Amino acid sequence: MDDTLTVTWTDPRGIVWDLTSGDRGVKLDIGQSGLGWSRIRHSLIRDDTALAASRVAPAELDLIIRLDDTKYAEDYYRLSSEWWEQANSPFMEGTLAVARPGRAPRTRRARLRESPGTTWPYDPGLRGQERPAELWPLLCMSPWWSGPEQEIAHRYNTNAPTRLYYTDDGHGWPLQIGASSHATGKHITNTGAGPMWPNWRIRGPMAGARVGVADDLLAVAGPLGSGDEMIIVTDPTRRAVWDVDTGDTLFHLVSGTWAPIPAGQRVPVVIDVDGIAPGAAIIATAAEQHAQAW
């Protein structure tokens, strides 16, 4: 079994670059910075005699790469153009992944932080000259490396009592609605270094729902019809609520407290559904957040 780290970059187009093997022409060189703790900030008070707060800043990585030195002329220009203009962008994110042998990767979502500022001797595509290693500067809005996800699912119980709902005059949509449904005995444990922010995938039909961790809940206003599906991302660096089919934002349907699972804690997951019906489900996922890439 290989006993080295594997580093890959999934660019904004979804193309995977293996930076360990250099299979697409780009390979990591010597001298990587930013694979551990992000910059730590402490706020002191009372003439610096007491600590008021500590926080970890967005991550900045300075990685060193080399483009395939067996490519010249047009082959080199094409590779350089694809890497710096399509595989990297200050406006769109890719995913940097680092995997230990036999382990699931840890990932950071990143974008180009600044110009690499490479100095060339003359024409980088010419034969007979040594090309310099290049700086690959990345910005990650999250300071953490994300590990594998934990998942908790709560689905419609076919044994739950149901009844048909019509309008008052007996007409309309015959939606089969069940009683309220509660997830019990479900927990998520955070053994990482940073807070775990859960994502929620909610699929109707249901009249409404409350989801969250411990006492911190988000209320989802309903109803959600059959096939309606929404996703709630609670991470403050990527916070969003949208309709899976249309992509429309649905922030107006969600209210309450946005809360993570704190580091080192095991907390109950709350899933409380009103009027659940066949086909409905709520799935919570959360990934541990680590300080290092391995």
Image: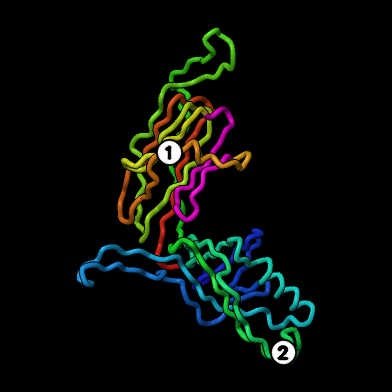
Q: Is residue 163 left or right of residue 133?
A: left
> Disc 1 to disc 2, how far (Cα)?
58 Å
- Magenta region: which residues? 224-243
Res. 62 visible in picture = yes
In the image, what residue type sits under mark 2? Answer: Tyr
Residue extending farthest top: 169
Q: Is residue 190 left or right of residue 84?
A: left
- Residue found at x 50% / y 71%: 5
- Residue found at x 61% / y 62%: 91
Q: Quadrant of the C terminus?
A: bottom left
**Where's residue 32, x and y in %?**
50, 78
- Mark 1 lies on a secondary structure that is strand
- Mark 2 lies on a secondary structure that is loop
Q: Nearer the viewer, mark 1 or mark 2?
A: 1
CB atoms of marks 1 and 2 within 8 Å? no
Task: Please give the residue where the numbered disc 2 appears in the rendered image.
Answer: 122
* Quarter assignment of residue 210: top left
In the image, residue 182 lies in the stretch drawn in magenta: no
Instruction: In the rendered view, tell whether residue 284 sits above or below residue 14.
Output: above
